[in-house]
Image (spheres, helix red, strand yellow):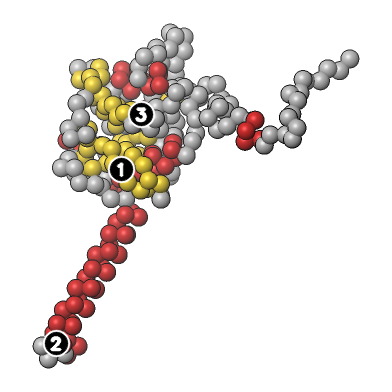
Amino acid sequence: MTTFPKYIPQSDPPLPPWETLPTMYDLPSDNPEEPGLPDDFHFLQPLLLYLTFQPINWNPELVYSAADLNLYYTIEHPLWYKRPDWFGVVGVQKLYKGEDLRLSYVTWQEPANPFVVVELLSPGTEDEDLGIKQNKTDKPPSKWEVYEQILRIPYYVVFSRYTNELQAFQLVGGHYEPMNLNNGRILMPEINLSLGLWQGSFRDIERLWLRWFTLAGELITEPTEAAIEARQEAEEAKRKAAKLAKRLRQLGINPDELD
């Protein structure tokens, strides 16, 4: 005998689906091994970090960063990996061995471990990201354990877009110590940069973003911003030139005849 699932009777007239079906807030990831949600913010925020990670005291050819890339961390278990929302490395070429785009970041085949890692907190991953949840001994270690104890990454940053809380940890004596913010920013003097929150528009989305600054607090511009600034400067120079030319003509001088 075939049994059919029970159907929920509709009202008459039926309600629209946006009132009866689950919303984007109700639907979890379909992968139980990775409960974080691959949402728009998890694409745009790492992109802004990628575009503005420009350590002033390093050759740009030896600065590498990546988002949502498998990070393999122990030769004893070569299939174990973490996938940081974003991480940055200095002293490493953009292409693997100067030849090819990376499929993953395999630490035992690279000249340096990540210098800084950023995790964007999600309700399903918050405990592991903050070191509250420790994995079982027969399971891979948590992100916190990997970053602190295995890779010894100097700076670990977590940011919640839900609370706008920024937390940072620095490796001191082999373990992470909470960092105090300096004027709202995390100072990293080794690379002459700081990391902080910025209220502004990125890709036409106005909100509070995490991005890179100089140590003095000046914004590191991304290419679109740099192009806008260059255009504005050119327009301002054109206005000044037109104003000067008008003034010269008022004085009886033809600016077109000047060398």
Q: Is disc 3 surrounded by few (<14), some (14 to 19) or many (20+) residues within 10 Å?
A: few
Give the residue number, with chain letter if any, for mark 2.
250
Instruction: Give the mark nearest the N terminus, 1 or 2.
Output: 1
Q: Is residue 210 left or right of 75 when viewed as pictured?
A: left
Tell me the distance, in whole angstroms, between the alpha carbons under discs 1 and 2.
Answer: 45 Å
N-terminal of the pair, mark 1 or mark 3, is 3
Which residue is at the front of the view, 218 or 72? 218
Question: Residue 137: where, in percent of width, then height?
Answer: 43, 8
Residue type (three-letter) at the residue carrying disc 3: Thr
Residue underneath mark 1: 199
Quarter of the N terminus within the rendering: top right
Choose the circle earlier in sequence order: 3 or 2.
3
Quadrant that contains the C terminus: bottom left
Q: Which mark is residue 65?
A: none
Residue 100 sits in quarter = top left
The quadrant holding residue 72 is top left
Residue 32 coordinates in the image, percent (x, y) = 55, 21
Give x and y (percent) for residue 205: 40, 46
- Residue flagged by tag 2: what amino acid is it? Gln
Residue at the spot x=33%, y=39% of the render? 208
Residue 82 locus on image (x, y percent) = 43, 25
Where is mark 3, residue-wise?
163
